Amino acid sequence: MSASSEPYLVRLAERLANGLSRMDEARRDRHRSFILSCQQSDGGFGGREGDSDLYYTSFAVRSLGMLGGMSTAEASSVGRFLAEFDWQGLGVIDLTNWLYTALAVQVFGGGDLLEDEEPDWPQRIAEKLERVRGSDGGYAKSEAGAAGSTYHSFLVTLTYELLGIAPPRPNRLIQFIYDRQRDDGGFVEIAPMKNSGTNPTAAAVGLMSIVGGLDDELREDVRDFLKQTWSNEGGFQANKRIAFADGLSTFTGLLTAQDLNITNVASEAMIERFIALELEFPTGGFRGAAWDDQADVEYSFYGLGCLALLWSRGDATD
C-alpha cells in the first residue's frame, strides 16, 4: 500500500504523535496499558461492551500511534483481525477504518494486507464509493441512503486520499457542503437539520481543506459558530443547545480552530485543565464527559488527541 503524498489522516497522525511526545513516560504507560487492555483475543479492540470491531480497533491503533506506535507483534495481531474482513463488503465507515488501520499495520511491520490484491483494487474501491453518492453531490451512508451526509462525505474524501485518487466532481462536493451551512456559521449533518453542530462543522472544514473551498469568509463564519459552542467548563459542546462539553466535540472544535488559525475563541489552558481534571482517569484512559463514569478507546483517542494538539503548539495559554 502506498500513496504519492501524505493524506490528511497520515498528516494528522504525525502531528498528534509529535505533540504527545511531550507526555511523561509514566503517564504515557498508563494510557498505553489501558488501550491494550481493551484488545480482544482475535487481535481487534472492543468498546465498553461487545466484541472487537473495526470502529474501536481504528481508535485504539491511532491512540497507540500517538503513544509511541506498535511493536511488530502488536501490529501483526491487529493485522490478523483485519484479515478476517473482505473490504469489498464493507460500508463507508468500516472501509475507511479498515484502510487506515491496514496502513498503520504495514507501517509498524505487521504486513501488507493488500499485497495479494489485483493491481486495480484502488479503482474498485473508488467505484464502490461512487455507488453511495447522491444526486445532491454528497455521499450517503449506504446505497439505500436517500441523501448525502456531511460526515460520510468527509469519510469518503479521506478514503479517496488514502487511495491516492482525487474525488470525482469536487466542485459538486464543495457545493454540497456549502448547502449544509446554516445562518449561525456552522454546518449540519443532513439537509433537514436546522441547528449546526461542532462535529459536522469540523467534518465540513476537513473535507474542504482537502478538495478546496476554504476562504476568509468561511473562516469568520466558523469562528462565530465556535464561539457559540464554547463552554465555560473548558471544552466545546456538540451544539449550542447542549448544556455540557464533551471530549469528542472538544477535539474536533480545537482541531478546526487550529486548522483555520482561529484565535480568541477558546482558552487552550482551560481545555487542558478540562481534559486532565474532568476526563482523564489516573489509572489510564479517558471518559466522554464529566458525567460519564467509564473510559473507552474512542474517548481515550479524543482525550489524548486534545493534549497532543495543545502541546504541538507549545505551552497552552489563555
Image: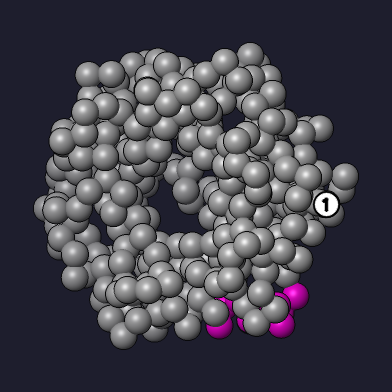
Which kind of residue does numbered mark 1 sit on?
Ala
Q: Badge 1 is on which residue?
A: 269
Which quadrant of the figure has residue 55?
A: bottom left
Q: Measured from the top left, where is residue 143 in percent x and y?
A: 16, 36
Please indicate, yes or no, whether residue 64 appears anywhere in the rendered image: no
State the extent of the magenta-drawn residues as a range.
Answer: 24-33
- Please give the name of the residue rendered at 14% of the width and 53% of the height, measured from the top-left corner: 89
Is 66 in front, or is 41? 41
Numbered label tally? 1
Residue that sits furthest to the right in the current view: 318
- Rendered view: 28 above or below 291: below
- Rendered view: 81 above or below 276: below
Q: Measured from the top left, where is residue 86 in percent x and y?
A: 15, 60
Q: Quadrant of the N terminus?
A: bottom left
Q: Measured from the top left, where is residue 76 in percent x and y?
A: 33, 78
Q: Quadrant of the C terminus?
A: top right
Is 184 in front, or is 80? 184
Per the image, is 159 magenta? no
- Please give the name of the residue rendered at 58% of the width and 65% of the height, measured from the top-left corner: 292
What type of secondary structure mainly makes up the magenta span? Answer: helix
- Please give the name of the residue rendered at 73% of the width and 70% of the height, measured from the top-left corner: 23
Left or right: 64 as drawn, with respect to 26: left
Which quadrant of the figure has residue 158?
A: top left
User: The residue tagged with tag 1: helix, strand or loop?
Assistant: helix
Residue that sits furthest to the left in the current view: 118
